[in-house]
Image (tube, rainbow, N blue to C red):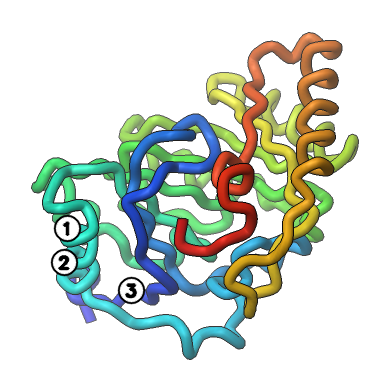
Amino acid sequence: MSEDHALIRISEIFGPTIQGEGTLIGVPTVFIRAGGCDYRCSWCDTLYAVDSAFRHQWSPMAVGEIWEMVRELSGNRPILVTLSGGNPAIQPFGPLIKLGHGEGYRFAMETQGSVSADWFAELDHLVLSPKPPSSGMKTDWTAVDACLAAAGAGPDIVLKFVVFDDEDYAFARAASLRYPKLSVCLQPGNHTPPRPDEEEGCVDLSGITDRMLWLVDKTTSDGWFEARVLPQLHVILWGNRRGV
């Protein structure tokens, strides 16, 4: 099956809402969450889109089907479309991006940088989020380099790091030195992710706030003025609820 006719595994499509994290925080968007991931992070907050035990909830959809849902949700008005997951990089999103661009829509994607694809160059925004030690995963920097090479000069590229502790912070700092030309966003980790079978689990906002205050103090005292410390706005507003 050619890429133009390949089916995409979809966990959910929802919106319009706002982008809840990273440098696009607050921007109105429609989310397309792909099913499937090559990682298993210890603190993953979207296991229902990651663990193959939930693949019966994913739908293989054609580009046209997906796009009809996006157009309906957005009222046929161009909006930012966020490709999420799981790891959306493992899905054939190229034709969808081409179709959406033809109607004035913009596309952003976040991925851990483990898989690259030629269509990265067609994105408007690419968020590379290598996973720190607390995730239990190991970053392959040659794979991250391949993602950057695939994207080229096409999208605006940002590095984003989830930070739980000093070891994660050191990981983010070292990675930023490896890619000094890229903007950096630091995000306090959510230590109360929902179970995959929960529509909305409890969240420890005070604990997350304490971690964010620690991050602000840490970056400013270290003179790391190039880093931006930002919250997960959707967690503050809606907790761990899905589809927002």
Rendered image quadrant of residue 237: top right
The answer to which of 79 and 97 lies nearer the viewer is 79
Mark closer to the observer (1, 3): 1
- Circle 1 sits in a helix, a strand or a loop, which is it? helix
Question: From mark 2 to mark 3, how far is it between C-alphas?
Answer: 14 Å
**What's the residue type where badge 2 is placed?**
Glu
**What's the residue type where badge 3 is placed?**
Ile
Q: Which residue is mark 2?
A: 68
Number of residues whose C-alpha sits closer than 10 Å to that of mark 1, classed few (under 14), some (14–19) or many (20 or more): some
* Residue appearing at x 50%, y 41% in the figure: 127
The image position of residue 206, as x and y in percent, is 81, 41
Rendered image quadrant of residue 69: bottom left
Query: Which mark, residue 243?
Result: none
Above or below, 190 against 213 in this view is below
Residue farthest to the right? 166
Question: From mark 1 to mark 3, how far is it between C-alphas?
Answer: 17 Å
Number of residues whose C-alpha sits closer than 10 Å to that of mark 3, classed few (under 14), some (14–19) or many (20 or more): many
- Circle 3 sits in a helix, a strand or a loop, which is it? strand
Asked if labels 3 and 1 touch by Cβ distance under 8 angstroms, the answer is no
Query: Which mark, residue 8?
Result: 3
The answer to which of 158 and 216 lies nearer the viewer is 216
* Circle nearer the N terminus (2, 3): 3
**What's the residue type where badge 1 is placed?**
Arg
